[in-house]
Amino acid sequence: MFQKTSFTTLIVGVFVVYVLHTCWVMYGIVYTKPCDNPRGENCILPFLAEKPRLQLSIYTSLRPNADGGHNLILKADDFDVSAKFERIVNVTLPKKTRNNGTLYALVFLHKPGVSPWQDPRQVHFVAQLTTYMLPKPAEVSLISGDEQVEQENQKPPSVDPASDLPVSHWRSRLTLNVVDDHFRFDKESLPSDVHRYLRVFQSGRRMVYLPLLFVDELSNRVKDLVEINGSSVELPLTVAYDTISLGRLRFWIHMQDAVYSLQQFGFTEKDADEIKGIFVDTNLYFLALTFFVAAFHLLFDFLAFKNDISFWKQKKSMVGMSSKAVLWRCFSTIVIFFYLFDEQTSLLVLIPAGVGSMIEVWKVKKALKIQVFWKGLKPTFLFGKLDESERRTEEYDTLAMRYLSYLLYPLCIGGAVYALVFLRYKSWYSWLINSLVNGVYAFGFLFMLPQLFVNYKLKSVAHLPWKAFMYKAFNTFIDDVFAFIITMPTSHRLACFRDDVVFLIYLYQRWLYPVDKTRVNEYGVSYDEKTKGKDHED
C-alpha cells in the first residue's frame, strides 16, 4: 500500500497534519484555563476588579534603568483603564541621542500622587524609542539634478547619506495596552508567556496580580521612523492607548518573541517590518484567514514547482509551445529579482525570486535546445534545430509577437520617458530597473497572449502542462485574496487580477479544443503513436 502512495499524496498528508497541529497550537495560545474554584483557593485575582485609582506616567531616559536622570513627558492623573486615547507629545532629545545615541521610554502605572519609584505596587515597562537603520539614499531628478525635498525647512543630516553605517532613527509611535478582562488565573496552570509580565502581591489570604501593562512593539513600523540628526532638538511622539484581551495579549507576546528571534538571526529592521505588517495591518479574523490562505499558497506553489520541473525535464519538443512566452517569463522574473534587490526587499521575498529566476533560465535552455560546451573558461553555445511542426509553431508565435509589439513598445517607452521627466530616482540604474518592472507589472500579461494565439491556430491545448498550470491558477485566485488583505504596491495588486482574465481564456480554450488521442501531448508525442508501438506485444 505504501509503495503505491504518490509523492504528491504524501506532501498533501504532511500539509494537513501541519495545519491541524498549527490550529491546536494557536488554540493553546489564545485560550487560558480560568480558575473555577468558588472559594478562590489557588486563584490569582485581578487588582483591577477593585476599581482602584491609577496614574499613568511616562519618562524618557538615556538608560533603561533611569540612571543618569529622567524627564517626564506625559502624565495622566486620573487614568481610566477602559478609555482609549491618543496624544502627541514633543520630546526633547538629549545631546547623546542626537549624536547617534539611544533613548528609552519608561512607562509606569502607579498610585496617584506618589512617585512611581516609591510605590511598591507600581507596574512599569521599558521601551526603546530609537533604533538603528541604514540611511535612505537621496533621490534626485536625473534630468535637472535637483534632490527630492520632503519638507520645506528640512535640515541636512549629520551623517553622510552615502554612508553604509547605521544611524539612529526615532520611533514616532508608542502603543500601550492594559488587559481589562478581570481574568482569574489558576496557580497550577499559569501560562509561561504571561508569567514574566505578572506582578503578584499577598492581600490577606488572597493572591492578587497588578494590571498587565504591555507595550506593542509590532506597531513600530519602518514607515514611522524619522532619522535623527545633530539639529533634531525636539521630535513628536504619538502615545496611543487601548485595552487588550488576554488571548490577544498572549498571541502578541508570541509574535513579538518570534520577530525578536529573527532579528537575533540577522534579520534587519526592514526584514522584520515585512512580518510586522502581516499582524498590524489586519485584524485577528483576517489574520486567521491569511494563515490558511498562505498555507494553501505554499502547498500549491510546491506542487506547481514539482510538476513544472517534471514537465520541462521530460519535454523533447516545442510543438504548440510559445518560445517567446518562455523568454518573456525568464526576462520578467530576472527584472523583478533585480528590482527587489535594488529596493532592499526582505530576504523572505528575495531568495524565492532568485530561485525562480534560475529555473526560468533553465527553461529557456530547454526551450531553445541550447547546449553549452566549455573550452577552459570560455563557453560555447550550440542551438538545436527545429522540425517542421516546431517551425509552424514558431511562425504563429512570431506573428503574435509582431502584433503585440505595435501596442507594447510605445506604452513601455512612453512610461519610461514620463518617469524620467517627472519622478526622482537614486541613480540611472534605479530608473532603468523601475521602468522595466513597471512594464512587467503593467503590460506583462500581454506576453501570455502569444500562447493563446498559438492554441487558436493549432486548435489544441494538449501541449500545455495542465497540472502545473492548474496549481498556478489556484495560486492566482489566492493572490486575489492577498490583494485585499495584505499591503502591497498598487501595480502588484492589479497584476494579480489581470492574470485571472488570461486564465479564464485558457479554460475557455480547454473547453473549446477538447483533448483527443490524436493530438500531441505535453511530451511531444501522441497516444496513437504509443498504441501503434505496442501492437506487436498484444
Image (tube, helix red, strand yellow):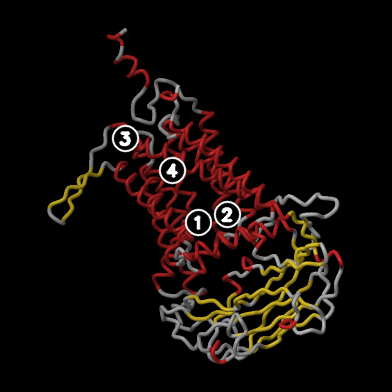
- Quadrant in which the N terminus is drawn: top left
Q: Nearer the viewer, residue 195 or 524?
A: 195
The Cα atoms of the two marked residues, 4 and 1, are separated by 17 Å
User: Going from the N terminus, do you reach mark 4 or mark 1 first?
Assistant: 1
Residue beneath label 2, please? 494
User: Going from the N terminus, do you reach mark 4 or mark 2 first?
Assistant: 4
Residue beneath label 1, please? 441
User: Going from the N terminus, do you reach mark 1 or mark 2 first?
Assistant: 1
Q: Nearer the viewer, residue 22 or 327?
A: 22
Residue beneath label 4, please? 450
Q: For the residue labelled by badge 4, is the local secondary structure a helix, a strand or a loop? A: helix
Query: x, y (%) of residue 128?
Result: 59, 76
Q: For the residue labelled by badge 2, is the local secondary structure a helix, a strand or a loop? A: helix
- Which of the numbered marks, if any, corresponds to residue 390? 3
Given the image, on which type of amino acid does mark 1 rest? Tyr
Residue name at image x 42 percent, y 79 percent: 165
Q: Nearer the viewer, mark 3 or mark 2?
A: 2
Q: For the residue labelled by badge 1, is the local secondary structure a helix, a strand or a loop? A: helix
User: Going from the N terminus, do you reach mark 1 or mark 3 first?
Assistant: 3
Q: For the residue labelled by badge 3, is the local secondary structure a helix, a strand or a loop? A: helix
